[in-house]
């Protein structure tokens, strides 16, 4: 039996991309980076500030609530210290979650550029 000349081979990507495919993907990534521009120093400082505030605000709120509880209900335990630590933990978890989400978005963007 002979093969039908009108029949096309299946359209799937080869296991190993060719050199031309790799060069094309890198060129596309570079062009996209040029269009979007690189974030400047102010962008980085802003991100550090945002992360800092996401830790500082819950910590200060915990300390303030603890001071209020200690003044209202004096006792052997320090609500200030306990709620300060709890606020710090919540702030750190909040910052970690935000940074992980941004990292995942960057990786997803990079994978989209590779395809």
Image (cartoon, rainbow, N blue to C red):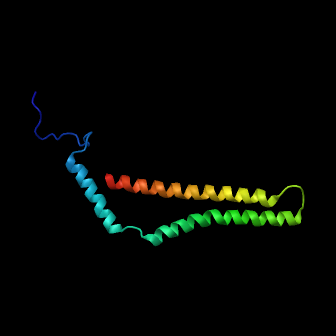
Within the image, what quadrant is residue 49 found in? bottom right
Quarter of the figure with residue 34: bottom left
Could you say which is closer to the camera, residue 86 or residue 18? Answer: 86
| Corner quadrant of residue 36 | bottom left
Q: Is 111 situated left or right of 54 in this image?
A: left
Front-lying residue, 111 or 60: 60
> Horizontal placement of 92 versus 105: left or right?
right
Q: Position of residue 75 (x, y in %)?
A: 90, 58
The picture places residue 100, in percent across and down from the top left corner, at: 52, 54
Q: Residue at x 9, y 30 (%)?
A: 2
* Residue situated furthest bottom in the rendering: 42
Q: Is residue 107 above or below residue 57?
A: above
At which x and y percent is residue 38?
A: 38, 67
Name the residue furthest top. Answer: 1
Total labels: the figure holds 0
**Residue at (21, 47) in percent of width and height:** 19
Residue ID at (36%, 68%): 37
Residue drawn 12% across the image and 41% down it: 6
Q: Residue 112: x and y, percent?
A: 36, 54
- 72 above or below 101? below
Quadrant (top left/top right/bottom left/bottom right) for the N terminus: top left
In the rendered view, does 109 fall on the left or right side of 24? right
Q: 31 left or right of 103?
A: left
Q: Nearer the viewer, residue 91 or 10?
A: 91
């Amino acid at each position: 039996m002979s093969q039908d000349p009108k029949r096309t081979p299946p359209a799937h990507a080869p296991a190993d991309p060719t050199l031309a495919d790799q060069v094309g993907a890198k060129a596309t990534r570079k062009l996209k980076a040029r269009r979007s521009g690189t974030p400047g120093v102010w962008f980085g400082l802003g991100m550090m500030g945002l992360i800092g505030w996401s830790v500082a605000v819950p910590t200060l709120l915990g300390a303030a609530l603890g001071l209020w509880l200690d003044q209202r209900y004096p006792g052997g335990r320090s609500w200030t210290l306990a709620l300060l630590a709890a606020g710090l933990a919540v702030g750190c978890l909040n910052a970690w979650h935000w940074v992980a989400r941004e990292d995942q978005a960057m990786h997803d963007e990079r994978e989209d550029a590779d395809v």
